[in-house]
Amino acid sequence: MVNTLLKGMVWHKDRKETPNPTNLLKQYAIPKADQNEILIEKTPEIMNGNYQQLKQRATIMKSIMPQVKFLVMLCDPVKRFISHVKHRTHIGNVTRRDLKTIKNAKADISRHLNSQPAEYNKSQLIYPSAQDFAKGNLNRTDPYVHYLRYGNYHTQLTPFIEVVGRENLIILDGAHMGNQETKYLEEELKLKHELEFEFNANKGFNCLVEPTDYCLSDAKGRPSTVNKMTALKNEVAILSQYYQPEMNLVYDIIYPEYNRTEFCSVQKPRFEWLKTYVCP
């Protein structure tokens, strides 16, 4: 049984006091509805913070749940950035929303480039770096600066790995959430195989067919009428260069013993989108 708690916890709230496991357990403990229940809590803001904030959140979670595991779904950080821009673009018409997303993304990247310190090359996005985000001493108040932060996967995951160990992070290919990733998840959680997905052509994404039929609503999937990666060719190149160091470190987390040359030669491996960053 899987019990999903959406935005029910306040891990992302910054705490000044030292976490007290006893008090936190009383505050957050949720009784199981079933002996075999798996509680899943999903709050995106968990990953939005500097190193100290993230490490404190991980410490709190481990204090309450010593055997906690983190499910990490990763996709191309450039596409994630653009998707985040689209998420904040509130226009009902699909085409108008896509065009506005492109305009907003161009403006965001231009603002990032021009707000860098004077000594930086304004044609390359260097500041704020992943380490600048980790230190938390940014000299800017751009409300959307955290869009960049979310894509620095290695730096943002490091505090969690330090607290709970790499073995307690189950990293999934968020770009291809289908039967391959589901099987991997079940194996990592030591669950018997039950989940089966099929691609739903009408909705444009996979839907659950076993052990029961279930599909996300039509509001999901965010249909597009414009190829934003093409329209944002220059911005994609800037973001790809920005994220490349982080993606090489992410590769080492996911595939610590998998030779890059072999990975680059395999057709459609897990995390194929990493080829953009780690393959010559």
Image (tube, rainbow, N blue to C red):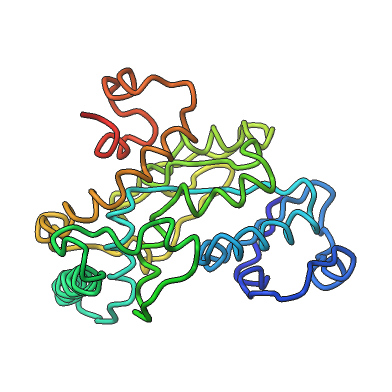
Write down the quadrant of residue 16 in the picture: bottom right
Residue at point 37% right, 69% down? 219
* Quadrant of the drawing holding the C terminus: top left
Front one among 155 and 11: 155
Q: Residue 263: horizontal and vertical position, in percent?
A: 33, 23
Q: Residue 140: horizontal and vertical position, in percent?
A: 36, 78
Residue at point 38% right, 56% down? 151
Front one among 71 and 111: 111
With respect to residue 90, does 136 lie above or below?
above
Q: State left or right for residue 66 relative to residue 117.
A: right
With respect to residue 153, does 167 lie above or below?
above
Q: Residue 8: horizontal and vertical position, in percent?
A: 66, 72
Q: State left or right for residue 68 relative to residue 276.
A: right
Q: Residue furthest right?
A: 22
Front one among 24 and 209: 24
Residue at point 36% right, 71% down? 145
Write down the quadrant of residue 203 in the picture: bottom left
Front one among 118 and 200: 118
Q: Is residue 94 among the parts visible in the rendering?
A: no
Q: How many marks?
A: 0
Q: Is residue 109 among the parts visible in the rendering?
A: yes
Q: Residue 18: horizontal and vertical position, in percent?
A: 79, 69
Write down the quadrant of residue 224 in the picture: bottom left
Residue at point 32% right, 48% down? 76
